[in-house]
Image: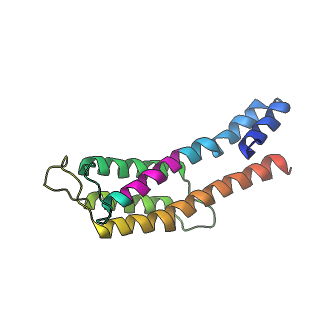
Amino acid sequence: MRNSHGNVNAFFQEIHDAVEQQQIDPGFLPHKARVYHYVKVLEALTRALDPQISTSILSVSETHDLLEEAAATIQTDLPVVSGTIPERPKGVTDQLREIAASLRGRSEDPASLLLPDARLSDRLDVLLHVEILPMVELSLEDRATDVVETYIRP
């Protein structure tokens, strides 16, 4: 069975319109894959910060870098979605960077192991489930609507 991305590609291949196909391709799999990769990273970091589940394998600097990469990806790959709070992706990325700046280790050395922090774990979990995941879904819905309105229903 083909997914909707495959159906759209097949449609454009059948009419041999590569230009149209290239215009809509970025709205599907690459966008979703990049962002969902960092959704999984953020879920893991939430658990790593939880004192009841904590891990002893992440350093402060590694965790900081992962949060920064997630923020950069969200800022780049999630445009402001129509009908939502203006500057929403930037607000989320600012919060991710604030969490990164609040990380503490077992010593002052950035290479030291990450200390669990229930407050940061909860904050990251809320940010992930209340802001980031809904924003991803709205962004994908918005892009799909544009494709349908532009190419399917003319």
Left or right: 92 as drawn, with respect to 141: left
Horizontal placement of 20 versus 123: left or right? right
- 12 or 105: nearer the viewer: 105
The answer to whether residue 75 is visible is no
In x, y percent, where is residue 69? 39, 47
| Figure check: 105 above or below 18 | below
Task: Please tell me whether residue 141 is drawn above or below residue 21 in the rendered image.
Answer: below
Left or right, residue 74 beside residue 147: left
User: Residue 12 placed where, x, y %?
Assistant: 80, 35
Residue 24 image point, x, y percent:
70, 42
- Work out whether residue 45 or residue 56 is closer to the camera in this orientation and state it: 56
Q: Residue at x 35, y 65 (%)?
A: 121
The residue segment tinted magenta is 34-46
Q: Main secondary structure of the magenta part?
A: helix
Instruction: Estimate the x, y position of residue 53 in percent, counting from the top left.
Output: 33, 61
Q: Nearer the viewer, residue 20 or 37?
A: 37
Is 71 on the left-hand or right-hand side of 80? Answer: left
Residue drawn 40% across the image and 54% down it: 44
Please tell me which residue is depicted at 42% across the width and 65% down the height of the picture.
125
The image quarter in which residue 97 lies: bottom left
Q: Quadrant of the N terminus?
A: top right
* Residue 130 visible from this viewpoint: yes
* Residue at x-position 27% and y-position 58%: 101
Q: Is residue 125 magenta?
A: no
Q: Is residue 35 magenta?
A: yes
Q: How is this picture coloured?
A: rainbow
